[in-house]
Image: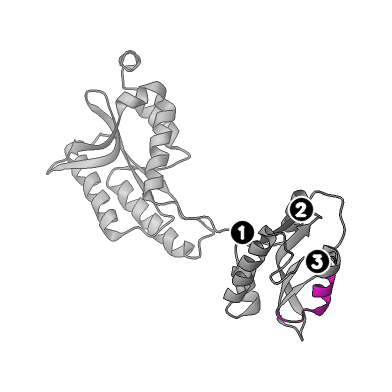
Amino acid sequence: MVQYVPNPIADERINIGVLAFDDNRVCVRFLSNWERVKRFGMEDIHFLKDFASRMEDAAADGLLFPGDSPNETPKQERLIRVAQNWFNSIQLTEPRGSLDAVESLLADIADTCLLEPPEEPKPRDRAFAVQVTRRKIKNVLGDAAKDLVKSNYPLSGYRTKHKFDLVVANGQPYFAAQGISFEVQVKETLQDSISWKISDVKKRHPDFPLAIVTLPPNPNNSAYKRLEKNYNDIRSMYSDLGADILTEDNMGLWVKNHLKPIDTTTIETI
């Protein structure tokens, strides 16, 4: 094991890399995410990353560590000598024998001893909300989707025309859907733009089905309470304007219900 010991006197340590070797090969693997190590040492850790890079270069040349010199001394003995004499911030543990192949041994040790912090999932943005909406509609329509689903399709409002993310039309529009994500902070300009679209179209066509497909805020987000309040306020506002507020879970059923007025024989012959 390659270990980081920020204070050798306290002897607190954290694993940062693993080393496996046989007579012919030397393999190393280091952490890919160093945030936990940085918090542990509370200091600049560029020197650790630099050491990891140099050790990877050494392993590619069949060496155990930077500065290693192949000679008649077996690899295991050379590594033991280093493990017993390195007392700085980077230390190596004494090697242990194994019957496993180098690659599988390295993978097993890395999975067990190199603790990587889980990656925080990236919030899904408005573009993702539109993708979800398109996929849900296409799942219901099947092959007919390529002719019926229109992107950025203009609908006439009382005062002007408005483009919606997705509109199902077959000579005439049957319903429209707009995607929006509350996993991120929604800009006021976007909130107002969608409000204007809904109100103007509904003023001219009160019974026309309009869906606002939402991605609700993620409870694991540190700003969840603020995002949730914004989500509830906007959802209520859009609903009052006459739109149907949906999530990805109930979008499919909504699409099926609003396809009923469409002549299915016409769809099948498109």
Packing grade of label 1 (10 A; few <14, some 14-19, many >=20) is few
- Which residue is the site of mark 3? 71
Q: In this view, does 188 lie above or below 130?
A: below
Which amino acid lies under the numbered mark 1 shown in the image of this protein?
Pro
| Residue 80 falls inside the magenta stretch | yes
- Which residue is the site of mark 1? 118
Estimate the spatial distance between the alpha carbons at disc 2 and disc 3, rounded to whole Å: 29 Å
Which of the two discs, 2 and 3, sits closer to the camera?
3
Instruction: Tell which circle, 1 or 3, labels the residue nearer the N-terminal end.
Output: 3
| Residue 212 falls inside the magenta stretch | no
Residue at horizontal 39 percent and vertical 25 percent from the top:
141
Which of the two discs, 1 and 3, sits closer to the camera?
3
Q: Residue furthest bottom?
A: 9
**Predominant SS of the magenta segment:** helix
Which amino acid lies under the numbered mark 3 shown in the image of this protein?
Asn
- Which residue is the site of mark 2? 108
Residue at horizontal 42 percent and vertical 37 percent from the top:
251
Tell me residue 52's x, y (percent): 64, 67
Q: Which region of the structure is painted magenta?
A: 79-89
Tell me residue 160's x, y (percent): 13, 43
Q: Judging from the image, what secondary structure is the residue with disc 1 in?
A: loop
> Marks 1 and 2: in contact by CB < 8 Å?
no
Q: Which of 143 and 50 is in front in this view?
A: 50
State which quarter of the image contains the C terminus: top left
State which quarter of the image contains the N terminus: bottom right
Instruction: Tell which circle, 2 or 3, labels the residue nearer the N-terminal end.
Output: 3
Q: In this view, does 135 lie above or below 44?
A: above
Residue at horizontal 61 percent and vertical 59 percent from the top:
118
Estimate the spatial distance between the alpha carbons at disc 2 and disc 1, rounded to whole Å: 18 Å
Left or right: 179, with 109 as reference point: left
